[in-house]
Image (cartoon, helix red, strand yellow):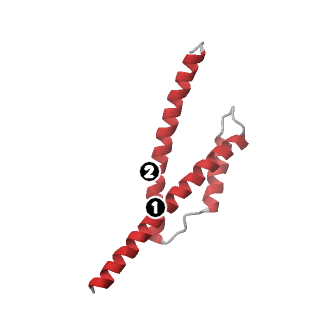
Amino acid sequence: MCTDLAGWRAQIDEVDREILHLLSRRAEMVAEVGALKHGSGRPVHDPRREAEILARIRDANPGPLSGDAVVRLFTGIIRESRSLESELVSVAEAAEAEAAEAVRRAG
């Protein structure tokens, strides 16, 4: 266990890298979910699912952060995930429109 400021900061830096890695993994999964939703015509925003996630996270919170703090953090994660999903759907829709236009021109 660390006893000095530099040691604690080094440990925090390592945890930050782990969090970033996990967020990147989550974002990759979100991209796959977005593709599935897009393919089935489902909307990006699913308020019921988001509420379930936040309730589950609040219930699983071991502290020392408050439940409200954890919900705020995950609300931001969900918001950014939804933004990524929306961007990917927009790119997919643009590609589909471009392909349809190419077929129309060729036909």
Amino acid type indicated by mark 2: Glu
Residue that appears at 47% across and 59% down = 33
Q: Quadrant of the C terminus?
A: bottom left
Q: Please tell me which residue is depicted at 68% across the width and 46% down the height of the picture.
A: 72
User: Where's the N terminus, which quadrant?
Assistant: top right
Q: For numbered disc 2, what is the local secondary structure?
A: helix
Q: Residue 4 appears in which quarter of the rendering?
A: top right
User: What residue does disc 1 label?
Assistant: 88
Q: Quadrant of residue 69?
A: top right
Q: Is residue 12 above or below residue 97?
A: above
In x, y percent, where is residue 58? 68, 44
Extreme residue in the left direction = 106
Q: Is residue 64 above or below residue 44?
A: above
Of badges 2 and 1, nearer the viewer stands 1
Direction bottom: furthest residue = 107
Q: Position of residue 74 (x, y in %)?
A: 62, 47
Residue with the mark numbered 2:
28
Q: Residue at x 37, y 74 (%)?
A: 98
| Camera-nearest residue between 100 and 29 | 100
Q: CA distance from mark 2 to mark 1?
A: 11 Å
As drawn, is 61 to the left or to the right of 11? right
Query: Is 70 left or right of 42, judged from the image as shown?
Result: right
Q: Residue at x 52, y 22 (%)?
A: 10
Tag 1 or tag 2, which sits nearer the N-term?
Answer: 2
Q: Residues within 10 Å of mark 1 (few under 14, many from 20)?
A: some
Image position of 63 (left or right of 40)? right
Q: Amino acid at mark 1?
A: Leu
